[in-house]
Amino acid sequence: MKHSEIKKVVREGYGKIAKTNSSCCAPTSSCCGGSSADDTSRKIGYTDEELSSVPEGANLGLGCGNPVAFASLKKGETVMDLGSGPGFDCFLAANKVGKSGKVIGIDMTPEMLDRARENARKGNYKNVEFRLGEIENLPAADNSVDAVISNCVINLAPDKKRVFKEAFRVLKPGGRLMVSDIVLTKELPDNIKDSMEAYIGCIAGAISKDEYIMAIKYAGFRDVRIVGESYYLELMNDPGIRDLIEKINIPPDVVKEIAESMVSVKVQGMK
């Protein structure tokens, strides 16, 4: 698949998600009519206090972890969220950095940006800004942010090495990277890797855990380490994934193998 084609399909897919409130990038039954976004978010590490602290509609249950929880954000810091969607993690980060800090959300989907900006208006967030852009080409100056976070988005980027290079570029010396994402412990079957539906569902774009960590190190980050990981064994219970399985006719034993090879990791690194 060409990079331009992948980006087009991902942009269109997440534009539809922004309009319909569906969530198709989560490990639990939230996709296309399953459990609520809040239920999904509780299962991947968000607290009730965090869920109640953001504007209604900011959480679509799209993540695979809670990067804000281990980001150690401080008052006055500038934070950038790669693939900010409707703004959920941005608003949580904004609560951490306070009025003297700033949060910048980057997303390539206009519909998501519209929704995020409306959520910011509803929540009266003056320290949050949303910018249209691709995470491979961040619309930000060199050495301008203290922390970069991302939640189940980098797996959607065709050029992950460039994403991490860009994150390194915009971080100040001493800045830090904290991401939650999907990685693999074994290679996917070809029919899954070539499926655009599987790409939007955060499956086909995932790379091996070792390759993911090496991409971060290659960008220049030091002290790179996995601070948490969990298997996606609930993948087979996701209604959206079940629809995908039927569409491309995946045998049950292969589905189980795929589920057992998908891991949610929380990774940090320093500049």
Image: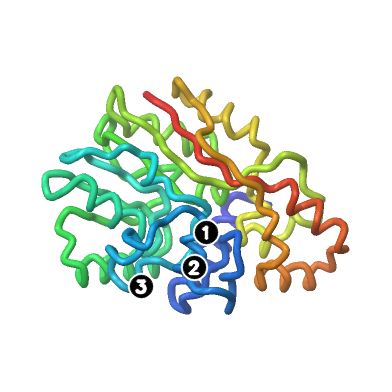
Side (left or right) of 61 relative to 57: right
Residue occupying the point 31% across, 37% down: 72
Please identify the quadrant where the C terminus is shown: top left
State which quadrant residue 129 falls in. Answer: bottom left
Q: What amino acid is labelled 2 in the image?
A: Asp
Q: Which residue is mark 3?
A: 57
The Cα atoms of the two marked residues, 3 and 2, are separated by: 14 Å
Q: What amino acid is labelled 1 in the image?
A: Lys
Side (left or right) of 212 relative to 111: right
Return the residue found at the far left. Answer: 100
Side (left or right) of 63 relative to 92: right
Residue occupying the point 64% across, 35% down: 209
Give yes or no for contact between labels 1 and 3 (Cβ–Cβ under 8 Å): no
Q: Which residue is mark 1?
A: 43
Marks 1 and 3: which is nearer the front?
Answer: 1
Give yes or no for contact between labels 2 and 1 (Cβ–Cβ under 8 Å): yes
User: Which label number is shown at residue 39?
Assistant: 2
Return the residue found at the far front. Answer: 48
Where disc 2 sits, the SS reads: helix
State which quadrant residue 233 falls in. Answer: bottom right
240 is higher (above) or lower (below) than 49: below
31 is higher (above) or lower (below) than 192: below
Give yes or no for contact between labels 3 and 2 (Cβ–Cβ under 8 Å): no
The Cα atoms of the two marked residues, 2 and 1, are separated by: 7 Å
74 is higher (above) or lower (below) than 95: above
State which quadrant residue 30 falls in. Answer: bottom right
